[in-house]
């Protein structure tokens, strides 16, 4: 067996691992990057990029089919060519993957080790059966995989995950989507707009991770106008018949029905890739879910020379967080035991549905009860949104009563990706609602709706402080 000695070993060449490798080698230390699966990262191969490409095609179809209210008519039927749709998705996806592969070319060959790593001792890894690595410290950046709950496994190869969608050569006719989380909603709505019959089934009412119940209700109503969505579904039976999946379920109107689908897309959450790493050999303790405890500012596991970054730590499984965490973990692994906290940015999550959903800072479930007020905007009457016929959705802003600081927001609405950035930057700048209201607002723009919500929050803050003063006197 080949033996390699290094300062830092990074397991996983995804976004987080690449970022960790780069940060570690920049300090002048030696690092190796171990990858067992295909190079190219989850984001570029089967995640962020192909999903957004599919959504872009869906948007084009939607716009083409919805010009009539503007007086824009298309003679004849809008025809969606599934083969061409999937061809562009895969071609463009391959282009993005190509950029990652180009970047890997710049990494010296001796630093890249192919195969699956596992711990065989506190500072020792084995990669498949060919290489033993002795490393002063290790970064675990092994990502996550789609979890398929046991009942679905019995349905065989017609049960699919996101990876399979992006391998299609053509669009199918009917897809049942299990899980109205981020993946289920993004892909589900895109398929619906591309002419695929879809049904989306969820459990316990959860929708896209929204914890503000009024915003969640608004999102549910909006999506239900476009495709079948039951976030609290009663699925009575799922079985395989030939090449079809047969689902018996109770519809929203309480009637029972049986429908046949080409595929069941399971998007019910993801699990960390940790189980094959043999963490005990590295003295890493895990909880009953198999997860180690770590410090999210340093990415260090306990006081060990082991760091954990990206989706694998199950903290905030998003691309920009994976990159930041990898950077922090790589730096700290290189300078171990001199471990220092890195910068963690304000929480920001965007779901690329239409309308988009966004969550910024703290949600109402995380804020102490009675400590905050909510500023609201209903997009129905918002000027610019109405001009564009995109006037659907609800924005909630949360502000701390004592400090008048803006602390978070949840929303579904037009161009929420842009509003969410302004809001995340405002939280990170620790701005008060009053300071935000002193910023310029152009006319006519969607951001004017944000100003309406801010004014509402300011009035609510004043009312809340008057109540506090009255109670106190
Ligand atoms: C459909 C979908 C859409 C998404 N859209 C977005 C989006 O729009 N915006 C956003 O911010 N995020 C999005 N995400 C999430 C984003 O893709 C992830 O947060 C990000 O890719 C995580 O990067 P990572 O480096 O942690 O993991 P990965 O990129 O998965 O890298 C982990 C690597 O480790 C390797 N590996 C695993 N075990 C071992 C081992 N034992 N030895 C060696 N190698 C190993 C794997 O092969 C893999 O290459 C999406 C995800 C999905 C699935
Ligand atoms: N736009 C983005 O940033 C983006 C896009 C896609 C994915 N992602 C990342 O990927 C992660 C994983 O996404 P995901 O959608 O797989 O997970 P998720 O946790 O967002 O959603 C899973 C959903 O499945 C539901 N569910 C669980 N068991 C079920 C069952 N048996 N039947 C029906 N529904 C069930 C849950 O209640 C939840 O609503 C996200 O949390 C996100 O961090 C981000």
Image: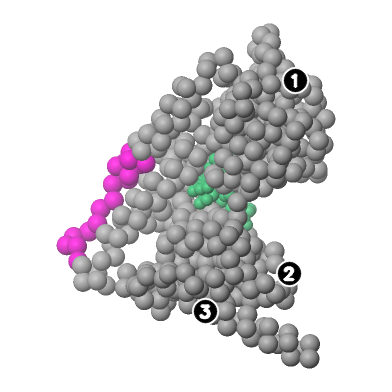
Left or right? Give the position of 372 relative to 101: right
- Residue 430, horizontal then vertical, whole percent: 61, 63
> Under tag 3, what secondary structure?
helix
354 shown above or below 43:
below
Q: Which residue is mark 1?
A: 124
Kindly indicate the quadrant of the structure image that contains residue 405.
bottom right
Report the residue at 69% width, 14% height from top: 5
Report if the CB atoms under discs 3 and 1 are less than 8 Å apart.
no
Report the residue at 37% width, 41% height from top: 89
Q: Which residue is mark 2?
A: 368
Depth check, mark 3 against mark 1: the one in front is: 3
Kindly indicate the quadrant of the structure image that contains residue 74.
bottom left
Position of the C terminus by quadrant: bottom right
Report the residue at 56% width, 19% height from top: 112
Q: Is residue 81 magenta?
A: yes
Q: Which residue is mark 3?
A: 455
- Residue 409, horizontal then vertical, whole percent: 57, 66
Residue closer to the observer: 177 or 340: 340
Q: Which residues are magenta?
A: 73-89
- Residue 221, horizontal then vertical, whole percent: 49, 71
403 shown above or below 63:
below
Left or right? Give the position of 86 relative to 421: left
Whether residue 178 can be seen here: no
Separation of disc 3 and disc 1 at Cα? 58 Å
């Amino acid at each position: 067996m080949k033996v390699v000695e290094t300062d830092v070993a990074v397991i996983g060449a995804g976004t987080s691992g690449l970022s960790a490798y780069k940060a570690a080698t920049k300090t002048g230390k030696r690092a190796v990057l171990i990858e067992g699966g295909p190079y190219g990262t989850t984001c570029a191969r089967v995640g962020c990029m192909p999903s957004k490409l599919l959504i872009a095609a869906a948007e084009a179809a939607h716009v083409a089919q919805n010009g009539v209210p503007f007086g824009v008519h298309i003679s004849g039927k809008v025809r969606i060519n599934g083969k061409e749709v999937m061809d562009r998705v895969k071609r463009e996806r391959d282009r993005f993957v190509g950029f990652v592969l180009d970047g890997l070319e710049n990494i010296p060959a001796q630093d890249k080790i192919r195969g699956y790593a596992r711990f065989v001792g506190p500072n020792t890894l084995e990669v498949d059966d060919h290489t033993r690595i002795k490393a002063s410290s290790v970064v675990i950046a092994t990502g996550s995989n789609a979890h398929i709950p046991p009942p679905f496994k019995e349905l065989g190869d017609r049960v699919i995950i996101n990876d399979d969608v992006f391998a299609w050569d053509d669009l199918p006719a009917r897809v049942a989507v299990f899980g109205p989380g981020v993946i289920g909603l993004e892909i589900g709505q895109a398929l619906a707009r591309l002419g695929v019959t879809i049904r989306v089934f969820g459990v316990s009412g959860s929708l896209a991770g929204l914890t503000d119940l009024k915003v969640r209700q608004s999102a549910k109503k909006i999506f239900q106008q476009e495709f079948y969505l039951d976030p609290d579904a009663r699925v009575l039976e799922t079985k395989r018949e030939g090449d079809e999946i047969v689902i018996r379920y109770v519809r929203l109107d309480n009637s029972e029905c049986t429908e046949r689908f080409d595929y069941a897309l399971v998007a019910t959450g993801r699990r960390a890739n940790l189980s094959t790493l043999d963490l005990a050999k590295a003295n890493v303790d895990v909880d009953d879910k198999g997860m180690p405890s770590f410090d999210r500012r340093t990415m260090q596991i306990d006081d060990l020379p082991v760091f954990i970054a990206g989706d694998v730590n199950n903290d905030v499984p998003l691309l920009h967080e994976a990159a930041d965490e990898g950077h922090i973990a790589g730096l700290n692994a290189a300078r171990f035991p001199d471990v220092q906290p890195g910068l963690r940015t304000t929480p920001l999550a965007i779901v690329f549905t239409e309308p988009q959903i966004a969550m910024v800072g703290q949600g109402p479930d995380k804020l102490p009860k009675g400590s905050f007020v909510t500023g609201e905007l209903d997009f129905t009457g918002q000027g610019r949104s109405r001009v564009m016929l995109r006037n659907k959705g609800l924005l909630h802003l949360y502000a701390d009563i004592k400090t008048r600081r803006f602390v978070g927001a949840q929303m579904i609405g037009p161009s929420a990706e842009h509003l969410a950035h302004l809001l995340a930057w405002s939280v990170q700048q620790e701005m008060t609602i009053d300071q935000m209201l002193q910023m310029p607002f152009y006319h006519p723009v969607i951001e004017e709706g944000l100003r309406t919500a801010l004014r509402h929050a300011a009035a609510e803050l004043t009312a809340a402080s008057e109540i506090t003063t009255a109670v106190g006197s």
